[in-house]
Amino acid sequence: MENLFADDGQASELIQQAITMVMTYAPKVLLAIATLIVGLWLIKRLINVMDRKLGAKDPSLNKFVCGLASAILKILLIISVASMIGIATTSFIAVIGAAGLAIGLALQGSLANFAGGVLILVFKPFKVGDTIEAQGFLGAVLEIQILYTIVNTFDNRRVIIPNGELANSSLVNVSIYDTRRCDLTFGIHYDDDIDKAKAICKRLVEEDGRALADPAPRISVGSLGDNSVNLIVRPWVATDDLWPFYWDMQEKVKKAFDEEGITIPFPQRDVHLYQAK
């Protein structure tokens, strides 16, 4: 009987301790959960506002800044919630720091991409909407994110390029200038009239409204090839008109040369046979 009463006393004591703990920590836990839910909601709203505001001013910057701000605010929110429950923030921060160090060593490539993204946004070698050629791809920049840059190619492919590679290797910004020089080369036969061929090319360039008068187009003999005299035609056009102008001139020059009797030769070889005595 004494053991039974002793057990009942211990059980009552445990129940009392449990009730005390519930009464002590339940409000803190409920408040922490409410703070976490409200905090996440506020962070989402704040990031959406930042995205709209920065997107209107600088589309290249908003995705990067919004992603970084979201990560920092969520980490601060988690630390605040932990301190509300009663977890010592100093030890919690120390654990996060140690985990961050371990993660940083494991994700050195991602840290390099992050640093590359910062360099891209600071020095601005390109921005959202520019056409770049990098890492073997040519396309328009769609987004600059924390770790990656998204490029849409002209044949409608989406390419994800790490920022570290973009920041530490050569790239070509095709659309940084409003005008570009269109480099054309046309071969004519050695027996054809060079001045006549140059006059045809000049007329076709001047008739096309996309060619700029200033700087003036350059039309010259570029080289004497194995099978042809190569004429270089160098007009300047608006950047957006470069490739349409290039393709149209190829067709126009071919048709005009055919009408005027100018021959575009193809590679050929003369073979001489000698009979051994």
Image (tube, rainbow, N blue to C red):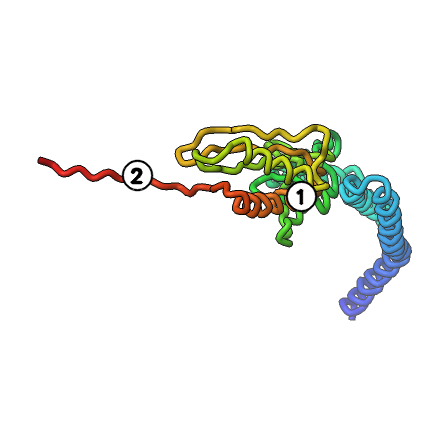
Q: Residue under circle 2? A: 270
Residue sitting at the far left = 277
Is residue 7 depicted above or below 162 in this figure? Answer: below
Mark 1: few, some, or many residues within 10 Å (few <14, many ≥20)? many
Residue drawn at x 89%, y 56% is: 34
The kind of secondary structure element at disc 2 is loop
Q: Nearer the viewer, mark 1 or mark 2?
A: 2
Name the quadrant containing residue 143. Answer: top right
Q: Amino acid at mark 1?
A: Tyr
Q: In the image, residue 39 lies at what x, y percent?
A: 87, 50
Mark 2: few, some, or many residues within 10 Å (few <14, many ≥20)? few
Res 148 label: 1
Task: Judge from the rendering whether residue 62 lies leftward or rightward of residue 179; answer left or right.
Answer: right
Q: Amino acid at mark 2?
A: Asp
Task: Judge from the rendering whether residue 21 lies leftward or rightward of residue 247; answer left or right.
Answer: right
Is residue 273 depicted above or below 18 in this figure? Answer: above
